[in-house]
Amino acid sequence: MTTDAQSKETTDGFHLVIEALKLNGIDTIFGLPGIPITDFTRKAQAEGIRVISFRHEQNAGNAAAIAGFLTQKPGICLTVSAPGFLNGLTALANATTNCFPMILISGSSEREIVDLQQGDYEEMDQLAIAKPLCKAAFRVLHAEDIGVGIARAIRAAVSGRPGGVYLDLPAKLFGQTLDAEAGKKSLIKVVDPAPRQIPDQTAIQRALDLLKAAKRPLILLGKGAAYAQADANIRALIEKTGIPYLPMSMAKGILPDTHEQSAAAARSFVLPGADVVLLIGARLNWLLSHGKGKTWGGKGPKDWGGQKFIQIDISPQEMDSNVAIDAPIVGDIDSCVSALLGGIGSGWARPSADWLGAISERKDKNLAKMAETLTKNPTPMNFHSALNVMRDIIKANPDAILVNEGANALDFTRSIVDMYKPRKRLDVGTWGVMGIGMGFAVAAAVVTGESVIAIEGDSAFGFSGMEVETICRYNLPVCVVIFNNNGVYRGTDVNPTGGPDVAPTVFVKNARYEKLMEAFGGVGVYATNPAELRKAMEEALRSRKPTLINAAIDETAGTESGRITSLNPQSAKKK
Ligand code: FYN
Ligand code: ADP
């Protein structure tokens, strides 16, 4: 029998995990209860951690990942064993790919049974499976090691290039008891989890020399720059040098998209035209055509192409991954940009009027074309007329966070909706993954308290749609807008056999998605024209009530895979 005096002197695995997280400033867990972590979720809530329960682990994982991106603290996703763990794994891999810090904590079956493959409940060697998909993976077997396990997971997630970490906690660990004093002493408060990495001065000088010699310089901002929260220094560098810049999707808003030096509306002109490109927290992956080929001026005018690259990245291994990097700067973005700024004195020569003038000309042409398209008001509504509304709404509400996924719904939104503040645009990222929508929306609302607008393709929404219940349960200020054109890409494909099945890309026509939100007590609106859409959006932002606007879009609008049609393999015949 345990007396009160004795119970006061002992602690257990449950409490040590909770205390270790709290000690390190982690105040929110995104997860889904079940064996063996149900009681853990209850105890965590009882001890003051905010526990946000989802309907599917992948959405909880995506929530954790984007919470990590927004806060620079690892987002925590908690799942049950085997199937729950696997459901969370896609998000963990996606977080690692996108350099978002998160920790997937999964309960697991007993080692003795798993290792002898004796068929335990949800038996799976989770650590081995997680390892290749994340930055680091750890398992804690003894309660006295919980402090070390959590500390290592936190450091691995946020130091250097951020990423996903897996932490395996077998069921038996939670109930293990330990002397309370010894338990307390075993916990670690991580000191300086993401230490600054100061760049080498030689690397800075090399980069400055290259930049000074440039005739047509360009700065490319990636989501690493947004993550780094080096907003003031980045802005100062751009404004002091006068160099035009191009934001990658999630870097939009580091400087307002309306900034006169933004070259976003002249993308296909500045990439091939630039002679020296400074990459700040952006990788030369597929989204930048690997730094070569036609996009970069290959086989274009004689003096185009063959760019020199300067790259700022915290990961030394990123350099030369696609093309030669002439001036690598390894370090954290804030330190690197600040070091570059130190070398830019009052005598700095701004880029030539020729280069800036040519960009302006191209930009003005594209902006005028866009303005003309946006004024049209066709029936039925198309992506442009609907996005014209969203563009005004974000302009009037620059603190709102925009979550965006889909194909056409993604690509049109990216170029039409200007962002005015950093880290306000959250989207499909490096993989172009569908399914981030509701997880990102929930986490963005939870960790920032701001209103969230999720612009979703009707297909994309389907991957995480059940989380509208989660949005309602926590009464979050999330407004989901579904661009409903009856299918994947659009709703007009037909089954060539004439058989009873619809084409693989087609959904139920004129589906009433808004009723899903109404089912859980939120506000549902069916909008068939821009005026209805605008009214519903304004009301959602005013009331901060969970809202789903089903925006009926012309089913013939949209192209296959949006602007990345070229990535679809074509049959020989079609060619
Ligand atoms: C951009 N543009 C503009 C503006 N902003 N015109 C007017 N006004 C404004 N504000 C122009 C820009 O110059 C381009 O025209 C065009 O609009 C598109 O700009 P964007 O979106 O920046 O450029 P692009 O070519 O689409 O970018 C390539 C990309 C991007 C690969 C980085 O497509 C991308 O991030 N794709 C992700 C796709 C994805 O993940 N999909 C999910 C899977 S879908 P031009 O300069 O004339 O070219 C599964 O099927
Ligand atoms: P985008 O898709 O917007 O181009 P990527 O995800 O490809 O952006 O690139 C982000 C890059 O930023 C990664 O190479 C990552 O290592 C880097 N990065 C992330 N955080 C920092 C930081 N604090 N300092 C320096 N580099 C960083």
Image (cartoon, rainbow, N blue to C red):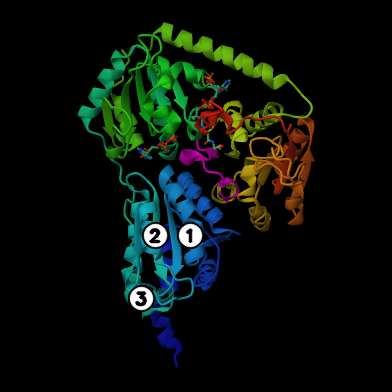
Q: Nearer the viewer, residue 444 or 376?
A: 376
Residue that label 3 marks: 116
Asked if 229 appears above or below 374 in the picture, the reply is below
Q: Is residue 79 visible?
A: no
Residue interval drawn in magenta: 422-439
Q: Nearer the viewer, residue 94 or 340?
A: 94
- Answer whether labels 1 and 2 touch (C-beta < 8 Å): yes
Q: Amino acid at mark 3?
A: Leu
Q: Is residue 425 left or right of residue 373?
A: left
Type of amino acid at the residue the image marks with label 1: Leu
Residues marked 3 and 2 touching at CB (< 8 Å): no
Quadrant assignment for ligand 2 = top left
Q: Name the residue that disc number 1 marks.
A: 86
Residue at 27% x, 30% y is 328
* Amino acid at dot 2: Ile
Residue beneath disc 2: 129
Task: Indicate the secondary structure of the residue bearing disc 2.
Answer: helix
Of labels 1 and 2, earlier in sequence is 1
